[in-house]
Image: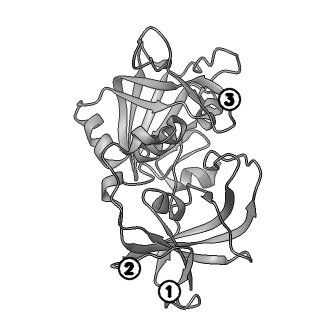
Amino acid sequence: MKTLTIQQPWASLVCYGIKDVENRTWKPDEVPGRILIHAGSKKIAPNFFDDIPEEIESYIFNDICFGNIPDLDTLPTGAIIGYVTVTGFEEGEMNSVWADGKGVTKWKLEDAWLFDEPIQNVRGKLGLFDFDLDENDLPPAHQADLYDVDINDAEDEVFIPCDETTFQQIRTGEYNSVKLFLTNDLIDILCLENEGLDMKPFKKVTVGCDDNYMQFELTDGTGVYNIPDLENEEKPYIIQYHDGIEGVWMEALFVLGKKLDDGKFESFCGGEVITDINDILKK
């Protein structure tokens, strides 16, 4: 089966279904269809985020906070970790945060799967290479459940998924706030339709991890803020987004007040905490 080596964390981002474009300076003669994804043996450097665009850092950081992907230093290397379908190639611009600019070929990716257990100790090769695995008899795999911020219909409560560590730190009081980078998709969810990117007037926040949740009042300080420049904190940090437009790097801050509730729930359906699946069926 055709196999492509991708270094981490990009390999895992592909197999989790987060990264929908792979950028290459070459392409095969034909669209390969389903291919295996091999995570290269190179370890992720401690200063990894110093060398990538801030917009990409924002998306990765948020997905780690949401529990969609594990910490980067835990991702497998030197292993075949899943598979994905290459549906075509694009030479021009693409409306994807993961697409590089001109001069590269964008491989369009869909239908990503993660092997339940990576195939360890596999050496990568340049280009597409063959690995002895039958496409019709692949090891057990799953598609990742990806969680995102949601709000209720009244737009006064926001739901934020959390990884286990963050959830416990909030429970013990070690964290009294939740901070997210204000990516383009979160602007549409969290901000009023004005030029100032003001946050909607949320009164409550529900943080969830698996089927556990805690609900808090939101207090003063909750809002959208410019990230200050590293060399001059009086100025905002200016970054270039994937569409070539420069803008301010921003974050959304949720300051936790009084705890209102906690327990287990089935889902945050339509912006409402559902503690019993039968509640959905009654609606």
Q: x and y percent of residue 20 in the render? A: 62, 57
Q: x and y percent of residue 278 in the render? A: 54, 55
Helix or strand or loop: what does disc 1 sit on?
loop
**Residue placed most toward the observer, 264 or 11:** 11
Image quarter hosting the N terminus: bottom right
Q: Which residue is mark 3?
A: 245
Q: Which residue is mark 1?
A: 131
Is residue 223 shown left or right of residue 47?
Answer: right
Looking at numbered disc 2 in the image, what kind of residue is underneath it? Val
CA separation, marks 1 and 2? Answer: 9 Å
Is residue 161 shown left or right of residue 128?
Answer: left
Looking at numbered disc 1 in the image, what kind of residue is underneath it? Phe
User: How dense is the environment of label 3, judged by Cα within 10 Å: few (below 14), some, or many (20 and up)?
Assistant: few
Q: Which residue is mark 2?
A: 122
Is residue 130 shown left or right of residue 100?
Answer: left
Helix or strand or loop: what does disc 2 sit on?
loop
Q: x and y percent of residue 69 in the render? A: 42, 54
